[in-house]
Image: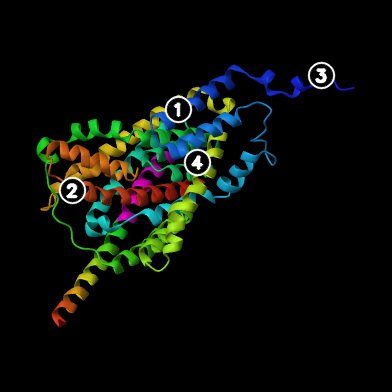
Amino acid sequence: MLNHFEIFKTAGLLSVTPGIIIMWVIALTLIYLAIAKDYEPLLLLPIGFGILVANLPMAGLMTPHDGLLWRFYHYGIQWEIIPPLIFLGLGALTDFAPLLANPRLIFLGAGAQAGVYITFFVAHAIGFNLQGAATIGIIGGADGPTTIFLATKLAPQLLGTCAVAAYSYMAMVPIIQPPIMRLLTTEKERKIRMKKARKVTKLEKIIFPLVTTFVVILLVPAAAPLISMFMLGNLFREAGVVDRLSKAAQNELMNIVTIFLGLPVGATMNAETFLRPKVIYIFILGLFAFMVSTAAGVLLAKLMNLFSKRKINPLLGAAGVSAVPMAARVVHKVGTEADKKNYLLMYAMGPNVAGVIGTVIAAGIFLTLLS
Amino acid sequence: MSNSIIVFISGITGVFVGMSLLYIAIRITSFVMDKIAMTKEGKK
């Protein structure tokens, strides 16, 4: 005969632990930040909800082979499907004209990757293994999908933590970057006006994704899944003959894969794997990576000015961290504080989009050497 | 030399080599495009 109290044995209520309650608080905090403070809501909202439901005892949403979110995670992320699809959408949304009009700004996107490698070195020095250190370092690239892609391959146990750190700091770019930019530049440097860039033809915009695909994949084959989708999306955009595909990649596809990216990433964060002292180090190192990337970009711009007649406003170097277009907006804002008529936004988009390519190359190199 | 130093040096070098190649490719493309544009204007 069925016992009336049998239901309580299968209810999750009796399995709640202090660790689980802490995870609920973290989940609700992320949901709050996404809704009330508009902190990267497209990702932090599903990530927060994923953490919440994955930490409801007995629900089994992350049970291997059986749980709903485990299936999203396995077939979407472990099978490397969702991050490249996000890149397809990003490519369709990206205009490379500011970079093509001012090609030397591409080096600022490379310079900002110094933060990735310096953080990798520091993380390894304080005890993380090479794979974990690489995953933490890539947070400095300020590129969520690349962080997720690399973490899945090198350090799946750090996936949730690194993704949350990356997206949290991306939302905090307007707070993190300006003090570093002001510290490393003089008022005079911040007032430097960029010379008017050349006009970019449609053919150049079409050739660029093709050339980039060749160059990057021939140099770093491990970066192929991300860079090929990124450039295909951009080709859709620039070709002008597949507007339907371009719009689908930018809107419907991007929105759908964003949902299936955030939920399972959040669901990988459970009390056993997340509530460890090392997580605090990851967040500190992630912040360090962002700061070093910003500083490296600014300093590289200043270095380039030593050898160039056409001066670059060194603030543009800070846009070398990906965080598109937030970092470019921050550059423009700090620039206008020094000179109200100095319009830097379009110039900053150059290193900004170059930073995305730089981060993908950096991730490809990590994969080549460490996987 | 420890593995982390090898990854560090290879990584930074690799990123700059990759971006330099892209820079050269963009410069070649823009040079050719500008020449084509000048030729077309000359014909007009």
Answer whether residue A134 is visible to the viewer in this image. no
Q: Residue furthest bottom?
A: B43
Q: Are marks 1 and 4 on the same chain?
A: yes
Q: Which mark is residue A32?
A: 1
Report the residue at 29% width, 31% height from top.
A175
Q: Nearer the viewer, mark 4 or mark 2?
A: 4
Is A206 on the left-hand or right-hand side of A368?
A: left
Q: Where does the image place residue A89, in percent across and percent down from the top left? A: 44, 53
| Residue of label 2 | A304
What is the distance, in whole Å, between disc 1 and disc 4 at their CAs? 26 Å
The alpha-carbon separation of the residues under discs 1 and 2 comes to 43 Å
Q: Are marks 1 and 2 on the same chain?
A: yes
Q: CA distance from mark 3 to mark 2?
A: 76 Å
Q: Earlier in the sequence, mark 3 or mark 2?
A: 3
Horizontal and vertical percent position of residue A282: 44, 30
Under circle 4, the secondary element is: helix
Crowding around mark 1 (Cα neighbors within 10 Å: few <14, some 14 to 19, many 20+) is: some
A121 up-or-down from B36: above or below: above
Give yes or no for contact between labels 3 and 4 (Cβ–Cβ under 8 Å): no
Q: Residues within 10 Å of mark 2 (few under 14, many from 20)?
A: some
* Left or right: A269 in relation to A298: right
Q: In the rendered structure, the residue with mark 3 lies on which chain?
A: A
Residue A4 is marked as 3
Q: Quadrant of residue A96?
A: bottom left
Q: Is residue A161 magenta?
A: no
Q: Main secondary structure of the magenta part?
A: helix
Residue A120 is situated, as x and y percent measured from the top left of the image, at: 40, 37
Verify CB contact (< 8 Å) between mark 1 and mark 2.
no
